[in-house]
Amino acid sequence: EMLVKANQAFEHKDYAAALDGYNGILGKFPDAYIIWKNIGNCYFAQEQYDKAEEAYKKVLEKNVNDVDALLSIGNCYFNRNQTDQALEWYGKIQFEKITDATVLFNIGLNCFKSSQYEDALRYFKRSTEVQKDFEDGYYQLGLAYTSLDKRAEAIATFEQFMKLFPNSEKVAQVQ
């Protein structure tokens, strides 16, 4: 019941009430370490990335391989424009375990901005595999191929883009 109320407060963007609820749960059930993710999410939503990171690290104290916590810490760094640190945290996650197209795309974008085009290509390609209709993923995949001077692959990707997204604002640029 406490968790339901705290989650409802979170959904309604009442982060103070959500935090009170989550902390109440930890007060009664200190072994429920997974609640630290919820606390981190509250702080993340409020753009308090240092506090969010602290909370996510509490999850890692109990489960060093928690993919969500690792991704979330990477996202904290990403949102603080600390690309190298974000990539370091993302790199701790087994590639195959990332199944969120947006997360894959964001990691790819970080790599792309750092001129790590091969890595960017890998993440953009995976983003389009896990979400077949991911417009931004196809677009950036084409750009990554272009940056690597892989023209045939770039053309094939951009042709696929135009087939899948004929009404996109990017069609003229892709053509």
Image (cartoon, rainbow, N blue to C red):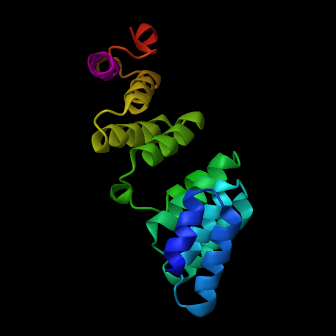
Residue 154 is situated, as x and y percent measured from the top left of the image, at 35, 21
Asked if residue 158 is among those painted magenta in the image, a careful observer would answer yes
Q: Which residue is drawn at 46% across and 71% down?
A: 66
Residue 37 appears in the figure: no
Q: Nearer the viewer, residue 168 or 94?
A: 168
Give the residues in magenta.
153-165
Residue 111 is situated, as x and y percent measured from the top left of the image, at 53, 41
Is residue 167 shown above or below 76? above
Q: Residue at x 41, y 25 (%)?
A: 139
Identify the main secondary structure in magenta: helix
Residue 91 appears in the figure: yes
Is residue 87 shown above or below 156? below
Residue 21 is situated, as x and y percent measured from the top left of the image, at 62, 76
Residue 76: which quarter of the image?
A: bottom right
Is residue 135 shown above or below 51? above
Q: Residue at x 40, y 33 (%)?
A: 137
- Residue 168 horizontal side relative to residue 46, left or right: left
- Residue 146 horizontal side relative to residue 133, left or right: right
